[in-house]
Image (tube, grey):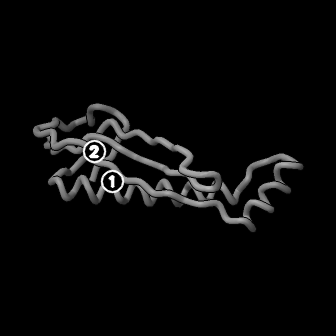
Amino acid sequence: MIVTTTATIEGKKIVRTLGLARGNTIRARHLGKDVMAGLRNLVGGEISEYTKLFAEAREQALDRMIQEARSLGANAVVEVRFSTSMVMTMAAELLVFGTAVVVEDE
């Protein structure tokens, strides 16, 4: 499966547009990780607990989008974008979406 943020794929032509493909996940923060993040916030630097949490969320959302695109019959997803939003005080949604397409070699 080809996944790209661009509208075109070098060496490929879009022969069919199948529609929206999306995947999401909602992740809650962990109290123990919040304590470590709060301490790290005092001294500065990367909050690796949250970096790891969002990296896992991105991968899960991407996997879900790819699965949906495959179920539509796609072999590529173009114009992929990410979005995040707060669902509640300690939880955030990560959404990834793009256009499911069928591509062939030019």
Q: Is residue 90 visible?
A: yes
Q: Secondary structure at mark 2?
A: strand
Between 15 and 81, the one lying in front of the other is 81
Q: CA distance from mark 1 to mark 2?
A: 9 Å
Rendering coords of residue 10 (x, y %): 27, 35
Rendering coords of residue 21 (x, y %): 28, 47
Q: How many marks?
A: 2
Number of other residues with Cα within 10 Å of mark 2, as a class: few under 14, some 14 to 19, many 20 or more: many
Q: The residue under label 1 is which amino acid type?
A: Met
What residue is at 60 percent from the left and 59 percent from the top?
53
> Which quadrant of the structure image shows residue 105?
top left
User: Residue 65: which numbered mark, if any?
Assistant: 1
- As drawn, 50 above or below 76: below
For this orientation, the residue located farthest to the bottom is: 32
- Closest to the camera, between mark 1 and mark 2, is 1
On the picture, is 95 further left or further right than 103? right
User: Residue 93: which numbered mark, if any?
Assistant: none
Q: Quadrant of the C terminus?
A: top left
Which residue carries the number 2 mark?
A: 77
- N-terminal-most mark, 1 or 2: 1
Rendering coords of residue 74 (x, y %): 18, 50
Between 90 and 20, the one lying in front of the other is 90
What residue is at 29 percent from the left and 39 percent from the top?
78
What residue is at 30 percent from the left and 55 percent from the top?
66
> Which quadrant of the structure image shows residue 67?
bottom left
Labels 1 and 2 touching (C-beta < 8 A): yes
Q: Is residue 106 visible?
A: no
For this orientation, the residue located farthest to the right is: 43
